[in-house]
Image (cartoon, rainbow, N blue to C red):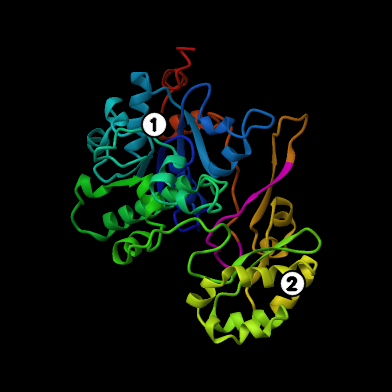
Amino acid sequence: MTDLPLAGVRVLELGNYIAAPTTGRLLADFGADVIKVERPRTGDELRNWRLYAGDTSMLYRTLNRNKRSVVLDLRTDAGKRAVLGLAARCDVVLENFRPGTLEKWGLGPAELDAVNPDVVLVRISAFGQTGPLSQRPGFAAVAEAMGGLRALVGEEDRPPSRTGVSIGDSIAGLYGAFSAMMGLYQRESRDDRPPLDRRSMDIALNEAVLSMMESLVPDHLAYGVERRRVGGRMEGIAPSNAYPCADGGSVVIAGNGDSIYGRLMRVVGRPDLGEDPDLASNAGRWQRRDELDEAIGAWTSSQPRDAALALLEEAGVPAGPIYAAPDIVADEQFAARGMVQYFDVDTGGEAPQRVGFPGVVPVLDGASVPVRHVGPDLGADTADVLGGLLGYSEQDIAAAAGEERS
């Protein structure tokens, strides 16, 4: 689509797993031509993550939508030359290898700058390009632990939990997209050419997580407070939790606003708690959070989920159902804004299957930008990209893709 905001921007993605591919997905969603380089034969390892059937996971299809897949063998001179040739024709290069890997391959910042003095380089790694831990490998799980998130997730009397998704990678991917746009804006808004070090964006997974931890560190240094796990609650804010309903469903109720709290207590039949002066602010309610949760839970347990939500909505109390995948697919609000989009996809059966995928955020013109295609098959665009952009012959393409080594 030529009318999308990033139409005309070309991106070279040298990355596996989730972080850099998330950056590439966000840019591709809004029109950037993202060329994803994958290794011969196996491709991005994400192709095999949560693979229930077939040869390409829905996780890969989701995170690599709207991109083009090119197979290059970076162990060969031909493969490296192709990368530099593509970089010369791109606005942004993304990578999430361990620091020093690109330099070892002869594809580092100096080489990229030599072929393209305007290129913006976005580098995502576990601990950043500098510092004593820069050479240490690490996935999102480690970053979430060291960035402070893991200590706050789960019940207080149990070991820390995960959030259920690779949130550290996704946050770093968001920062990657922001960094790419910042680099492009800087490049276009200055009369002089920004130096290489200002066009190289250094994103660490653990720092990306830390940046989401709100006042965790300032509260500790200012007041000696050490935040702890509180399950479904948020420390210092009450009542706000998940509550079971009579039909087996559950709801989240956020009644922690001072005026909202009084309305909530009237709905659950406890106006005495709503009028208690000791509970007029979050500080007092947090001290009696168990009492409040017990009162709210007793009411929700007597109500079917939808009935409870209807009463809460009528009273102006923020609340919602706890959704699983089937609920999301059936939800009319998601459907109205195009937030589940359907494609015929190979799932390992005899014929393609109709599968829904998440839509594009943010919404433009009232609905999600249409996803152009899901993550491509391995090497689906190798010939088109190398032939079209670099003028490669079939023999050149085979050499760069490592076919002569197989």
Magenta region: which residues? 354-367
Q: Nearer the viewer, residue 10 or 154?
A: 154
Residue pointed to by mark 2: 299
Circle 1 is placed at which residue position? 390
C-alpha separation, residue under disc 2 versus residue under disc 1: 67 Å
- Determine the image quadrant of residue 260: bottom right
Q: Which residue in the rendered view is the most extreme toward the top? A: 405
> Would you place residue 214 above or below residue 273 in this image?
above
Secondary structure at numbered mark 1: helix
Up-down: is 53 above or below 116? above
Dot label at residue 257: none
The quadrant holding residue 77 is top left
Q: Nearer the viewer, residue 264 or 11?
A: 264
Q: Amino acid at mark 2?
A: Trp
Seen at 34% across and 59% down, the residue is 217
Q: Nearer the viewer, residue 118 or 65?
A: 65
Question: What kind of residue is marked 1?
Answer: Leu
First reached walking from the N terminus: tag 2 or tag 1 = 2
Residue 396: image x %, image y %?
42, 20
Residue 241: image quadrant is: bottom right
